[in-house]
Image: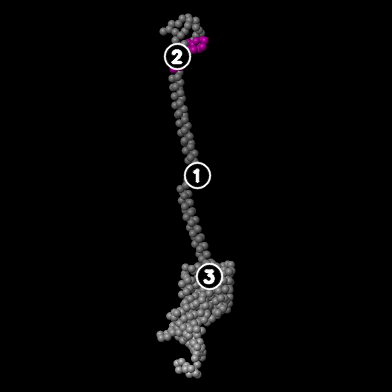
Amino acid sequence: MQLPLGLSALTTVLTISQLTQRVREALDDGLDEVWVVGEVSNFRVPPSGHFYFSLKDARSQIAAVMFRSANQLLPFRPEDGGEVIARGRVGLYEARGNLQLYVDAMEPRGLGSLQLGLDQLKRRLAAEGLFAEARKRPLPFLPRTVGIVTALSGAAIHDLLVVLRTRLPSVRIIVRPVRVQGKEAPPDIVQAIDDLNDLPGVEVLIVGRGGGSLEDLWAFNDERVARAIAASRVPVVSAVGHEIDVTIADLVADRRAPTPTAAASMVVPDHRDLHAWVDKTAMALRSGVLRQLRRQRDRIAAQTRQLRDPRQTLKGLRLRIDDIGERALRAVVAQLRIAREQLRGGGERLHALSPLAVLQRGYSIARRTADGTVVRDAGALRAGERLQLTFARGTAGVRVDDADPA
């Protein structure tokens, strides 16, 4: 039988799967580890957590994948448009026959991976408002208990304790020792902040360490530490490194101190300054009280000068009462005299009108003896009727002989 396309009996015909397998084996033999530089594009992260993206230059591109087990160690997150240097192996995705770069390490080109990761975290936390001044709390003026989160070794803890005890000997200090660098440092710091927040009486925290390189200070750039500081129920002062070092912890904390020594000075006042302030305030208070007393004395003295002696007032009132009494007595006597005159005049007028006065002039009054009625008309008398005549002095009984009416 004649073979198609002029193939001989010795020609091996491969299936597609066999071909892709041979290509993959060839790639594995010759490109088991390569370093490439390229621009990231089409970056995506499915629920599996693997990174899928493409690396390209001006002429070509290749699909790439970085599995979750490898990308969890990256201190930064790749972004579209970023140029990176990647290490990996070239393989063939046999199901589709596509070339693919399996990346196991990567770092940004031109900028360290730590710095890039730090910049990315700063932008994300700033967008959430964790750096906003509005959410930061004031420090207590005179805390009774201060919590410290730092390592027991090194100069930082020594400086903190010396300054705190010098400035305010009465302050209670609780130190929660932690690791301040290495992979175990961030969760240790987070737990320490939570532990001190659970202690009653702690009013402020100092979180920090002495100086070092960016890698040494990296625990304080960890997102977990930043969120623990933001969630603290009490104000937090960050004191990481030297003045030129600025970490994420510094940006999230309620106050940032350039050094641990400065943090201690920031957290508690100097007792000598407090004594001086109390003395100054006491002097000012005493002066104010004395000024007020002088003003009140002057006011009372002025009012006293305006007031008269009550005894003099009573004496004047007595004299006035005596004078009023005398005038009232004179008025009463005068009214009595007038009344007497009026009474005398009235009596005289009444006497003039009295029948007795008429009788004094020789007249008499005739009354019937039977009933005592006064006889005014002689025509009303009958002969033999008995009458009684009243004279100015005495009476006389008479009998009517005859009557002559007028």
- Image coordinates of residue 26 in percent, x first then y, are 50, 90
Find numbered disc 2 in the image and state the secondary structure of the residue it sits on.
Answer: helix
Front residue of 190 and 288: 190
Disc 1 to disc 3, how far (Cα)? 74 Å
Q: Are marks 1 and 3 in contact (CB under 8 Å)?
A: no
- Image coordinates of residue 125 in percent, x first then y, are 48, 73
The three-letter amino acid code for the residue at tag 3 is Ala
Which label belongs to residue 358? 2
Q: Do the residues labelled 2 and 1 touch (CB within 8 Å)?
A: no
- Image coordinates of residue 341 in percent, x first then y, are 44, 24
Residue shown at 49%/69% (left/top)?
136
Range covered by the magenta-colored residues: 352-374
Is 24 part of what is drawn in magenta? no
Residue shown at 44%/83% (left/top)?
39
Q: Name the residue under label 1.
A: 310
The three-letter amino acid code for the residue at tag 2 is Val
Is 362 part of what is drawn in magenta? yes
Asked if one can make out residue 190 in the rendered structure from this viewpoint, the answer is: yes
Q: Name the residue under label 3.
A: 231
Disc 2 to disc 1, how far (Cα)? 69 Å
The three-letter amino acid code for the residue at tag 1 is Pro
